[in-house]
Amino acid sequence: MTDAPDAAPDPCAAAAAGDPCAAETAETAETLGASGARLCPGGEGQVSHAIARVARAHRSTAGNLLRRLGLYAGQELLMMRLWDAGPQRQSELIKLLGLDPSTVTRMVQRLEQAGLVTREPCAADRRAVVVATTEAGEALRKEVGQVWQELEERTLAGLGDEDRSELARLLAHLEDNLTGC
């Protein structure tokens, strides 16, 4: 038994076998992605599927680029918040990042183990924990900025200034739709 097939399954063979989702016609060509793979069964939710795929690819690419710095995707967002606003209560980071408390706790623990942040009890409220960057964490600021610039360039490659502006406008509109703003 092999770990992976030698070639991808033939969609034409699947269509011949009666798989209606594999059949490709001129009318459904617009529901196919650049790779020729069906975006979604039956063509429903094409844009939502495309957004999900782009988000997944963006996060994966970010993760690969950040790995060079010893960071995982998402950790840089926490670090950026600390760089911009200074030390923050962990509860505030949870709200600002919109993540589950256990996710942020694990993220902070990993960053602390890597020597990039510290956690201290809050002087005003001993129950609260304040997260701050270390010198090593501050030293990553420029490199993270460079990674984000590289990610931006890869993401927008082939798009002109007008298309980039329009994409930013449309994405902001979609975000407003989804967040109720």
Image (spheres, grey):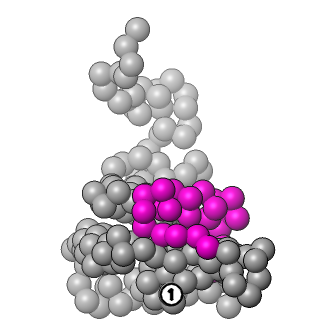
| Residue type pointed to by label 1 | Gly
Residue 169 place in picture, x, y as percent: 45, 90
Q: Is residue 134 above or below residue 27?
A: below
**Magenta-colored stretch includes residue 106:** yes
Q: Is residue 97 above or below residue 123?
A: above
Toward which corner of the image does residue 73 lie, by quadrant? bottom left
Toward which corner of the image does residue 165 lie, by quadrant? bottom left
Give SS at disc 1. Answer: loop
Q: Which residue: 27% across, 79% down? A: 142
Q: The C terminus appears in which quarter of the rendering?
A: bottom right
**Magenta-colored stretch includes residue 3:** no
| Viewer-closest of 174 and 97 | 97
Q: Which residue: 77% across, 82% down? A: 125
Q: Which residues are magenta?
A: 94-120
Residue beneath disc 1: 86
Q: The N terminus appears in which quarter of the rendering?
A: top left
Q: Which residue: 36% across, 75% down? A: 135
| Viewer-closest of 146 and 15 | 146
Seen from this angle, which residue lies furthest top?
Answer: 1
| Viewer-closest of 115 and 57 | 115
Residue 113 place in picture, x, y as percent: 48, 56
Q: Is residue 83 above or below residue 52?
A: below
